[in-house]
Amino acid sequence: RKGSFDHFMLKEIFEQPESIINTMRGRVNFQNKTVKLGGLSNYISAIRRSRRIVMIACGTSYHSCLATRDLFEELTDIPISVEIASYFLDRRPPLFRDDTCIFVSQSGETMDTIFALKYCIERGAMCVGVVNGVGSAISRQTLCGVHINAGPEIGVASTKAYTSQYITLVMIALSLSEDRLSKQTRRNEIIDGLAKISAQLEEVLKLNDKIQAVAETLVDKPKMLILGRGYQYATALEGALKIKEISYILAEGILTGELKHGPLALVDEDIPIIMVATKDKLFDKIINGIGQVTARSGKPIFIASQNGPALIEGSNKKENGVTETAAADYNGAEKSYVKFEVPETVDCLQGLLNIVILQILGYWLAVKKGYNPDHPRNLAKAVTTE
Ligand code: UD1
Ligand code: BG6
Ligand code: NA
């Protein structure tokens, strides 16, 4: 069932151009630029009237909520909060009948998320599911929802479920704003982006060999920093989770804006640093973050936009989408910086492409260390205890 792949994880990473199409099938009309989610159609106007939307999930599913939170805020103008299910339950926060709660779960069987759902049902909130598991507890117990239709995910480290959850949440945000004339141009831009995303993801997969070669250079490193901001904060967190759960490297996802408030102390010439630096409206701040890191002798590996603006001035050598920039650092020492270039899409969809680099990197780090990425120690695919 793994076909020509050595592991389910790699198979599932490579399935993503297809699984994200399955998620959109029959739902996004690319000609008329409309989105129709069968599972939500009777409830969409009620959700629009809610005072607040609370997204609740664990692990990778939580990261898909973070990845789309900005878009929900932008398109719906409804306050959005994003909650880790166990922390939400620890606090037992106030919740009201005019709140909508969205539960995101690959399995639909995660106990923390199920208990959070029970808590929200008891308080009369409208509960919506975004799950892969048809017939699962969360699918059954939510009032309504959307199946992400990613197909079975076997690898414990979630990959294709993440990209399909992400796209499903984008579709929900698009549906919620369908009545807003002022958002029409933006919605059309996003739907056009969705039309191209599968082919672009296919392009990213072509970097597999190069990512494997870069993994070779990182395999003995005990720790790693992954930096991102704005839409790419979720990419940094999810990338770090992938790397730590299967390669057991202590990878930490950091919001670039927080660097100077502590994590900068970790930066030196040894620690591997991956910076998500694709071009978006925060580009000036990204450049600023790169300066903060290189000024402390840090040597980042970049995930950047194809044909995007320079991140570091120096001489470039390009090979298979990977640019090596030789540049002098702040002490005048010659360094070479690696840059993976991914196709450019709409800002709110860019994370769908960027994360794939880190999924593949995590995979190769695990394999090169002799670990089976499909069965990380101490972890289970679905955690059915609290
Ligand atoms: C449904 C069918 C699909 C069919 C399509 C044709 C199912 C599972 N799906 O897809 O096979 O091709 O109609 O129009 O039979 N739901 C929840 N919670 C969740 C997820 C879903 O309550 O977490 C509910 C939905 O509100 C809906 C039902 O489950 O009532 C099916 O959801 P979904 O599969 O997303 O609906 P469609 O895409 O319309
Ligand atoms: C487990 C898995 O911890 O549950 C993670 O190992 C997953 O990969 C998390 O993200 C949440 O699972 P689910 O099924 O609710 O998305
Ligand atoms: Na249901």
Image: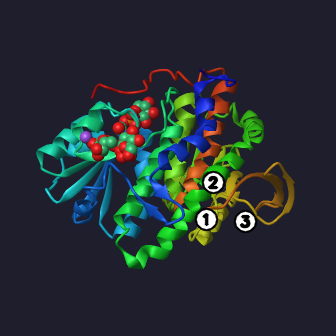
Q: Quadrant of the N terminus?
A: top right
Closer to the camera: disc 3 or disc 1?
A: 3
Dot label at residue 275: 2
Q: What residue is shown with label 1?
A: 286
Q: CA distance from mark 1 to mark 2?
A: 9 Å
Q: Is residue 234 above or below residue 252?
A: below
Q: Is residue 86 above or below residue 168?
A: above
| Mark closest to the chain's N terminus, 3 or 1 | 1
Which is nearer the eye, 322 or 134? Answer: 134
- Whether pointer 1 and pointer 2 mark residues with C-beta atoms closer than 8 Å, the reply is yes
Residue 145 visible? The answer is: yes
Residue 144: image location, x then y, percent:
26, 46
Which amino acid type is shown beneath numbered disc 2? Met
SS under mark 2: strand
Q: CA distance from mark 3 to mark 2?
A: 15 Å
* Number of dots carrying numbers: 3
Binning the other alpha carbons within 10 Å of mark 1 as few (below 14), some (14 to 19) or many (20 upward) gives many
Q: What residue is shown with label 3?
A: 308
Q: Please report the residue visible at 78 percent of the width from the left and 60 percent of the height from the top.
A: 329
Which is nearer the eye, 361 or 289? Answer: 361
SS under mark 1: helix
Binning the other alpha carbons within 10 Å of mark 2 as few (below 14), some (14 to 19) or many (20 upward) gives many
Ligand 3 - quadrant of the structure image: top left
